[in-house]
Amino acid sequence: MQHLVAIDQGTTQTTVLIIDEALCIVGSASREFPQIYPKPGWVEHDAEVIWKTVLEALEEAISQSGAPVASVAGIGITNQRETTVLWDRRTLVPLHNAIVWQCRRTTEACQALRDKGFEPLFRERTGLVLDPYFSGTKLAYLLDHVNGARQRARDGELCFGTIDSYLLCRLTGGKSHVTDLSNASRTLLCDIRKGLWDEELLTALRIPAAVLPRISSCSEILGKTQGLGILPDGIPIAGMAGDQQAALFGQACFAAGQAKCTYGTGAFLMMNTGDTLVRSKHGLLTTVAWKLGEQITYALEGSLFVAGAAVQWLRDGLGLIVKASEIEPLARSVPDSAGVVFVPALAGLGAPYWRAEARGLISGITRSTTAAHLARACLEGMALQVTDVVTAMEQDAQAKTGLLRVDGGASANDLLMQIQADLIGAPISRPKTLETTALGAACLAGLGVGLFRDQAEIAARWAEERRFDPRFDPQSIGALKDAWVKAVGKA
C-alpha cells in the first residue's frame, strides 16, 4: 500500500493528512498558529512559525498513521491563497511577516491604480478586481517598505511566493522556486488565458520579474524533498493548488457547471466552467480552477472574507460561546432570529459587492434580543452572503444551481446547511470526507506520480454523507432576504 501526504496550510492552522490509495485518511495532525494584527485591518503571519507547524504536523501525522515513510509516493500542497511571502533566496529566511489575504493595508494603493485607469487591464488579463485581497499590491508594499528589498529583488536575491511556493522551497532545501497556475492566477500578475506572468501588469505594480517563481501545472513533479529528516530525501512534491481550487478538485467537481462552497475562515463558492473563460458581469471573479498537462480548466468564484471567523468573533470578541461548536445548539434554541440581522463584514465585503470600506453590522436589536438570536443571525448572515454569490453565479452562468457540494469546518453545522438549502432553493450535498481541500491536494499529487490513472478514478471514490433538501417557507425567506438587503446597504 502506497500513501500520499497532503499539506493543507490554512489561515489559522496547518493540517497534514496521510491518505492511502483508497483515499482513506490514515493519519492526521493539526497545529494552530497566532494571528498578528499590527493595526486595525492589517493581518500578518510569521512564515517561520508556519514552517514549524508544517514540520510538527507532518511528524505527528506520520507517527499516528503507522505508515512506513518508504510508502510515501508523493506530497501535495494546498494553501491559503494570496497570502504573500518575500524571502532570501540563499538563506530561505523571510524578510518580513507574511501579509495575509485578509489584510486591507493596500486599499489606497488599489484605489490609486483605479484612478489611473488600470482596472480594465487587470480585469481583462487576470479575471480579478483591483482589491487588497490579492497578492500583487501586497508584494509591491513589501518591496517599498522593507529596506533594500526592491533592489535586492531586481538583483535576483529574493523570492516572492504565496504560501505554496514558500513551503515548496523549504521542502526542497531551496531547490525549487515554483508556483502552480491556480495560485499564480490570484496574484494580479498573471494572464490567465496564457498562463504566464504579464509584463504590463508587472510594470503597473513595479514588480521585477526576477523575484517571481516559475509557473507550473497543478499535477507534476515540482521538486523533491531534501534535508527534512522526518521524510527521506527524494520524495516528489507532485500536486499543488490554492485551497479553493483544491477543494473543487477534492469534491470531484470535474464537469462544467458543478459547484462547491467551502465554509472556513471565509466562505468560497466556486463553479467549474470547463475550458470556457466566463467573464462575470455580476461581481464574481474569473479564475483558474487547475491546469493538468497543457489543459487549463477555468472557474467562476465568489470570495467572502468572513464566515467561520464570525463565529470565532462571537466566541473570542463577545464571549457568547466558549467553543465554536456551541453556536448550533444555541441558535437552535430559538425558532428564528426575531428580526436581528448580522452582516459579517468584519474585514470588508467581498463578492459580489467588493466594498473594502464596509464594516460589520448588527441591526434589529430590541430588549428581547438574546444571545441565541445573535447566534442564529450569525448563521443566517453567513448563509445570506453565500446566497448573494449563488444568485450572481446563476446570472453569469445563465443556469440554476442544481446541487451545491459543501465542505470546510462550518459545513458540519446541520442548521447552517439547512438554512443554506432553504435560502438558495437547491439541495446541499455534504461528503463523507470534509477535508476535501487536503484530499484535492493528495489527488493532484497522486495523478502527478501515476498513482491514479485519471479524474474518473478519483470521482468514483467520492461519497456523500448527507443531503439537505430545501423546505423553506417562501414568505419568511423573502422577508429575511429583504431585511438582509437593507442591512448590507448600511454596512
Image (spheres, rainbow, N blue to C red):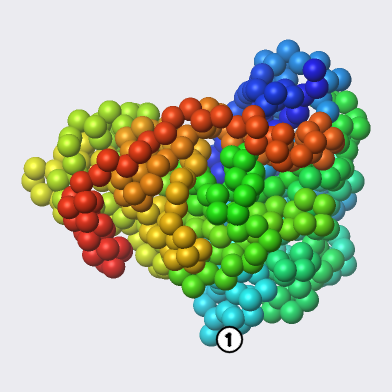
Image coordinates for residue 261, horizontal then vertical, percent? 49, 46
Image coordinates for residue 287, horizontal then vertical, percent? 62, 61
Q: Relative to 209, does residue 264 appear above or below in the rendering?
A: above
The part of the image, by quadrant, that contains residue 294 is bottom right
Q: Which residue is mark 1?
A: 117
Whether residue 4 is visible here, answered yes or no, is: yes
Q: Pointer 1: residues within 10 angstroms few (<14), some, or many (20+)? A: few
- Element type where label 1 sits in the image: loop
Task: Choose between 309 and 302: the one closer to the eye.
Answer: 302
Does residue 351 appear to the left or right of 460 in the view shown? left
Does residue 484 appear to the left or right of 130 in the view shown? left
Does residue 164 appear to the left or right of 448 in the view shown? left
Whether residue 340 is visible here, answered yes or no, is: no
Task: Choose between 4 and 375: the one closer to the eye.
Answer: 4
Looking at the rendered structure, the kind of residue marked 1 is Gly
Q: Which residue corresponds to the image point at 27% horizontal and 63% vertical from the top-left?
A: 485
The part of the image, by quadrant, that contains residue 487 is bottom left
